[in-house]
Image: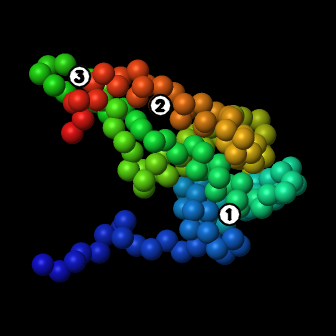
């Protein structure tokens, strides 16, 4: 049977400034209504702010480490067993880990209002780099839920 091309199999091109596939993925997730140039400008302005505020580190390294810090190791999934629904802790697929980290960062910056988005993004990335901030709190809550439900780990599929 011939191998079929799927959307997930398409290779993402690295971003033009830092040659990073992760940065390109982040810009695509940040993008709204197909306006990629605006999303790129917001991302690069945020990295410029990070470059000014964090000394001794490259901005792209701060960004990469921030995303790495937020990636969850384990999450809970609902599993129905004999009429009861259990929250079963399961390990997270590496691709999903990255997706969740990006999603949590974007949710954190979108819920804060009143300041330009590139400043909110820069602050959240610096906070995540230092293992603080809203996205890091979300990760800790997910890990706490998994730890609280580890008695149901034997239901994992």
Residue 64 x %, y %: 64, 56
Q: CA distance from mark 1 to mark 3?
A: 43 Å
- Determine the residue positioned at 23% across, 22% down: 85
Q: Position of residue 74 (x, y in %)?
A: 42, 38
- Identify residue for label 1: 40
C-alpha separation, residue under disc 2 versus residue under disc 1: 30 Å
Looking at the image, tell me whether mark 1 or mark 3 is earlier in sequence order.
1
> Which secondary structure, mark 3?
strand
| Residue ID at (80%, 53%) | 50
Is 60 displayed left or right of 106 in the figure?
right
Secondary structure state at the residue bearing disc 2: helix
Disc with the residue nearer the chain's start (2 vs 1)? 1
**Towards the viewer: 132 or 49:** 132
Q: Position of residue 130 (x, y in %)?
A: 72, 41
Q: Nearer the viewer, residue 126 or 157?
A: 157
Q: Which residue is mark 2?
A: 142
């Amino acid at each position: 049977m011939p191998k079929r091309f799927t959307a997930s199999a398409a290779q993402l091109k690295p971003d033009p400034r830092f040659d990073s596939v992760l940065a390109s993925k982040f810009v695509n997730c940040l993008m709204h209504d197909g306006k990629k140039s605006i999303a790129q400008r917001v991302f690069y302005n945020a990295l410029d702010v990070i470059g000014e505020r964090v000394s001794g580190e490259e901005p792209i390294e701060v960004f990469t480490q921030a995303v790495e810090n937020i990636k969850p190791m384990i999450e809970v999934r609902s599993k129905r067993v004999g009429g009861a629904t259990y929250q079963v802790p399961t390990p997270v697929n590496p691709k999903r880990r990255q997706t969740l980290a990006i999603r949590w960062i974007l949710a954190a910056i979108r819920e804060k209002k009143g300041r330009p988005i590139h400043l909110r993004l820069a602050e959240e990335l610096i906070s995540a780099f230092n293992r603080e901030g809203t996205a890091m709190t979300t990760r800790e809550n997910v890990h706490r839920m998994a730890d609280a439900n580890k008695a149901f780990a034997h239901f994992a599929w």
